[in-house]
Amino acid sequence: MEDLFSNVALGLTTAMSLTNLLYCFVGVLLGTAVGILPGLGPLATIALLLPLTFGMSPTSALIMLSGIFYGSQYGGSTTAILIKLPGEAAAAVTAIDGHEMARNGRAGAALATAAIGSFFAGTVATLLIVLVAPPLASFALSFGPPEYFSLVVLGLIFSVTLAHGSPTKALAMTFLGILVGTIGRDIYTGEYRYTFGLSLLEDGVELTGLAIAVFGLAEILRNLETPAEQRPVIAKVNSLFPTRQDIRRAGLPVVRGTFLGSILGVLPGAGAIIASFASYSLEKRLSSRREEFGHGAIEGVAGPESANNAAAQTSFIPMLTLGVPGNAIMAVMLGALLIQGITPGPTFISANPELFWGVIASMWLGNLMLLVLNLPLIGIWVKILTIPYRHLVPIILGVCTVGTYSIGLHAADLYIMAAVGLIGYVLLRWGCEPAPLVLGFVLGPLMEEYLRRSLIISRGDPTVFFQRPISAVLLLLALLAVVAMVSPRLRRKRAEIIVEGES
Amino acid sequence: MTKIRKFTAGLPLSRRQATGAMLAAALALPFAGIAHAQSFPERPIRLVVPFAPGGTNDSVARIIAESAQGILGVPVVIENQPGGASNTGTAHVAEAEPDGYTLLIQSDTLTTNPIVYSNAGYDALTSFEPIAMVARVPVVLAVRKDLEVETIEDFVKLVRERPGEITVGTPSVGGGNHLTGLLFRDKMGLDWVDVPYPGAGPAVTDLVGGHVDAMWSMAASLMAHQESGAIRVLAVSTPERSPLLPDVPTVAETTELKDFAVENWQGIFAPAGTPRAVIEKLSEAIVAAAKDPVAQERLQGLGMQPAGSGPDVLRAQIESSLPRWKEVVEANDITVQ
């Protein structure tokens, strides 16, 4: 324990040096900015800034780069809530209830909940790294292809609960998402699938672009179908901060989201997106106000936003303690360290205590900075909603276009965005919601990848999924979820809820 | 010399390329070519990375760009053009104006892709002018830490005892690492299970986690894990031992394949038709940039063997590996339409 205190003290002294504080601030500020802008994400930003870090000390470099990453998780929710445009893929689920809250005049409460939830999650996740980083890392390594497959199956089954309308339509949208996810190059054979000979489809559809189109564009089209004078006016913003009741309702979801995000963040490949979707599903299952989900339930903002921030933070664990990057961003960070001559791995913490503890301490300071930075901004952000819609639409379209183009600098992505936006609108008119589609799109290809890899390794033996304990437990949970969903008593209850929701 | 060979080789110039070449020739006629080369470079140079930001190729590009712009006196701007298994960005440079202001950084993927993909959109030898090789990258065979083998001979013995059972992670189907493994497998007459991954990162994670038995990979992805003991490197593919892993024997010295020699590399290219004087100027600058001690240290940190070789070495490398990869790809039928 004494060691722990001296380590934390060392970390805080390192992180509080004027230079490091400055780099931390620059990092979180940049992160917030790229999080708000759809398309331009933390990965591109970090890669662009990499050469700048060559001249810095490794500690300052990592402090700044990680600030960009978790800062972007804060920023991503802002546009999702205000104009239903997820700035980051991980914020897509926040757009569902966050934007509804904004329409009800509660944008301030939603933004504040996202910021406070993220801060709580960031603090807890930092503590987790301090306390249990090595055991968590080895837990992550025990996840092989069969375990991932079972986890993804569980996630897909929960995706049906993401929709607040008909489960059949939700299922159909999930499948559509899975199908769209198969477009592109098959990693097992190198062959192209569903590309129709179009080179623009060879690399598949890009997630951020898809989310921008089905959420942002489709929403604009739906708003435009009613003439301006009949359009439901966005309720006057009554309070910028959550009410006491809000805080009571958001408390537990924040805690659960933090827990879920911390676990999923450690697993290489799972990450922040799945964490936010999983948290939303969980909250909806547990809530006594299930009918409010999709119409501005604060739990639907609090849980996912905490989860994605916690996941962003704990995804550092396998990178730092094992040298195993869990996602592309961690791979770039690993590169940044290697270029500096530092090798992450089991001996990393003991060999570079100042670096490790300094970066960890900076994460907490950075989260604090983000909270201080974001709360006062809420007053400015909600003013956006007072802009007349005829001015707002071109601005949103401009942001969508620039954002989608900035992902890969391919003009073709803009055609895809326009087409998908139109399809998304038609589906919306038919009462099909975009959230299960996005989740199917994220999880479908992962399910295929892990299923095929598991079977290749087991040489075609499907019992591998039941022989491995973690995998078996996950599949059992999935089975229970299905049973709960189709059992007649629950189905009747669900039907009642839908009728209520539609009336 | 280069110029004559290029235009008499009867290569299939696209219409756009042909028009571009004619136009360039017509425009260049009134001006003295030497004056142009002397003033080169006058504006920023684009270095196209045909992969997403963050990969090995991208990191090398940024290290070289950083040290080359000091020597060239103009900014070297990195442009990531990922897509089509790197064919998109590579073909883009092949079709770019051959004026020395659009360059490409590529690895042995430049050689393997036109063999694997029928629609690669370029020819490894005739679409580019090699400028410089900046790093050499040994390919290694690594095994999970608890696999009961000590040497590559043990490994071969194990695969022979349990044919079709040992799993070998493949960073990317049809890539250099995959083909190196297949070359070894075919020459030794072995039978193992190839497990494809969408890149080196996840494959290394599964090797460290013990979910696959072995992996052929660029040394760069595995160096850190070799040091920490999370995996064990059994052999390097290069003709001589690598200075990065001086204790690890080569495939040639430990097996009956005495002529086994595969080496990956990172090199810089210009579109074919770039004036010779410009190539020379660029080559000199980039070789110097790669030999800069700071750049060398950074490259070594990434698990690369710094090199600073001119166009001839790079061209010879491509020429020698083309027929070898063609044979492996055809024997294993991994072409993509």
Image (cartoon, coloured by chain):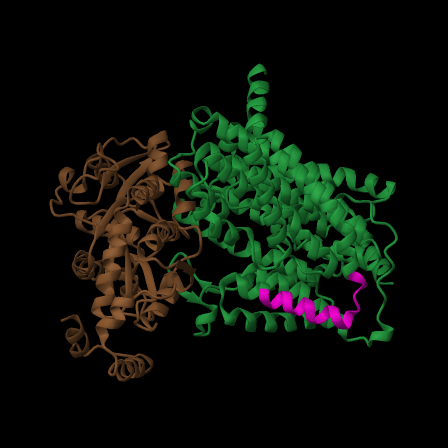
Chain colours: A green, B brown
Q: What is the magenta segment's predominant secondary structure?
A: helix
Q: Is residue A34 left or right of residue B209?
A: right
As for residue A397 lying within the magenta part, the answer is yes
* Placement of B184 over or under A414, stated as above or below: above
The foreground one among A128 and B149 is A128
Residue for point 52% across, 40% down:
A466
* Placement of B249 over or under A148, stated as above or below: above
Give the residues in magenta: A385-402
Total numbered labels placed on residues in the image: 0
Looking at the figure, which quarter contains the C terminus of chain A? Answer: bottom right
Residue A26 rendering spot, x and y as whole percentages: 58, 44
The foreground one among A78 and A462 is A78
Q: Is residue A229 left or right of residue A265?
A: right
Residue for point 25% across, 30% down:
B150
Residue B336 occupies which quadrant of the picture? bottom left
As for residue A434 lying within the magenta part, the answer is no
Residue B318 occupies which quadrant of the picture? bottom left
Q: Can residue B136 be seen here?
A: no
Residue A369 rendering spot, x and y as whole percentages: 67, 39
Residue A402 rendering spot, x and y as whole percentages: 58, 66
Q: Is residue A364 left or right of residue B43?
A: right
Looking at the figure, which quarter contains the N terminus of chain A? Answer: top right
Q: Can residue A44 be seen here?
A: yes
Residue A145 rendering spot, x and y as whole percentages: 47, 44
The foreground one among A34 and A138 is A34
The foreground one among A311 and A159 is A311
